[in-house]
Amino acid sequence: MKKNDRFHFVAYLSPPPAKVGYGEFADNANFIDEENYRTMTDCGFDRAIGLFENRTAHYLAGMRQAEKAGMEYFVRDQFKGGSLEGFIDRPFRGEPRISASLAAKIAKRFDRYAEMPAFTGILASDEPPASKFPAIRAAQDWFAERYPEKKFIVNLLPTYANAEQLSGVKGAEKFDFEKDYVGAFVDAVRPEILSYDHYALIYDAKNKKNVLREDYLRNLEVFAVYSRKKKIPFYNFLLTLGHLFYRTVKTYADIAWQVYTSMAYGVRGVQTFTYWTVLSNGPGENITSGLVDREGRKMPAWYAMRKVIEEVRSFEDLYMRFGWEGTIPVRGGGTENPAFAMLKHPFSGDGDISGIRASEDCIVGVFGNRGEKAYLVANYTDPADGKKAVFSARLHSEKAILFRGGTGKEISLQDGWFECTLESGEGIFLLPKK
């Protein structure tokens, strides 16, 4: 499979260089080595994004190890002495333009990166307001002209950002997320890839219980609709770091729930926040662990992630051939799911699938490719609850290929009916055979 046809698993916050931490972690060792990069590929990741690398030499070292491990590598350009991220963050009165002197400073670094086989692109801006979109477009145009084979990615804010954060206008009270933020970004920047982060797994300390963010599916829906309409692939970030009021991700269900619910909306790649545990833990950060700890030791979530990646790799070639058509929310419990109620474009299905039932809430991604159909079914119950969901639907065919748990097999359908019990967090990929 070509690299561009893969479902990308991206390790954000790759192994850090020496002495880049904060507070008690300021004296960290150098972790940019072959062993730590091999650990990423052993887990199944095919891309890495640097964060703590604050010198050109650090990025080059990361790219050398990424090449050895067979990974692609993305940089952040945050240098104080003239950078793309600094240009984007600068206030402009007129039309943003990269000066010749700034272009020379940036190119001095990136020309060296471009010589490295692992260098794939740049995460150019993280969670920018709409006021920065003109500068992002200018930076993207400059970058695309000089490095046409490389990716330029901007990671956008989620729906729970407030109007001031979304607009970049102090005191703003209203700002339409779908039209004025995501839609405006697509129209102004014309990106090659869409990306955003939204973390749904929350621990409510006040009430001492786990909860899901209600607008999680709404975020997926907004990006999926623009992705389909504009034919732009989209990625999202997974919660893999315990911090603030977010849960410490530990189990298969924690990881699988995030991956499969995302795939039910046609996502083409997922990114971790974070792979390496952040090298700080200041007041209120409440940092526990990522997929590996601050010394690079594998945490339970690393093994859970490896299992999920193995499962996805078993059907990614088929999944990537299909286009997302819509997602069906399937109510299973006795009460209304607020996440389902927030959807503006719930899919009702088509003639190729009917009679959908579930004992617990599920979602069904509907995909098409030249008359063929495929379905990705995900258990939508909170992974912390450990609930199984009995799912059934009529596929109107005699046989289907079922991908589950890392293997695919042909199954027979009685009068077209399919039924299975989904474990907590589990997802399956179904391909009916005519």
Image (tube, rainbow, N blue to C red):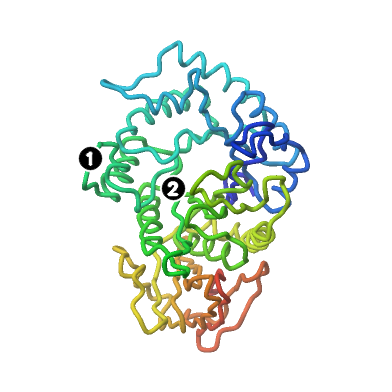
Which residue appears at 63% of the width and 21% of the height? 112
Three-letter code for the amino acid on which mark 1 is drawn: Gly
Please determine whether, in this image, residue 201 is positioned above or below residue 282.
below
Q: Disc 2 marks which amino acid?
A: Tyr
Residue at the right extreme of this rendering: 35
Give the mark nearer the N terminus: 2 vs 1: 1
Viewer-closest of 238 and 227 = 238
Q: Determine whether, in the image, residue 310 is placed left or right of residue 425.
A: right
Tell me the residue that label 2 is attached to.
Answer: 196
- Name the secondary structure under disc 2: strand
**Residue furthest bottom in the image:** 414
Question: Which residue in the protein does label 1 denote?
Answer: 171
Task: Choose mark 2 or mark 1, whichever is in front.
Answer: 1
In the shown orientation, is residue 78 left or right of residue 66? left
In the rendered image, residue 375, in percent from the top left (x then y), is placed at 49, 69
- Determine whether 252 is above or below 177 in the image: below
Q: Quadrant of residue 361?
A: bottom left
- Horizontal and vertical percent position of residue 282: 53, 43
Residue 343 x, y percent position in the rendering: 32, 65
Residue at 45 percent of width and 82 percent of height: 358
Instruction: Report, in whole angstroms, how far the alpha carbon at label 2 lies from the one at label 1.
Output: 24 Å
Q: Residues within 10 Å of mark 1 (few under 14, many from 20)?
A: few
Label 1 element class: loop
Question: How packed is label 2: few (under 14 Cα within 10 Å), some, or many (20 or more)?
Answer: many
Residue 99 higher or lower than 355, as above or below? above
Position in image of residue 428 (x %, y %): 56, 70
Q: Is residue 270 left or right of residue 70?
A: left
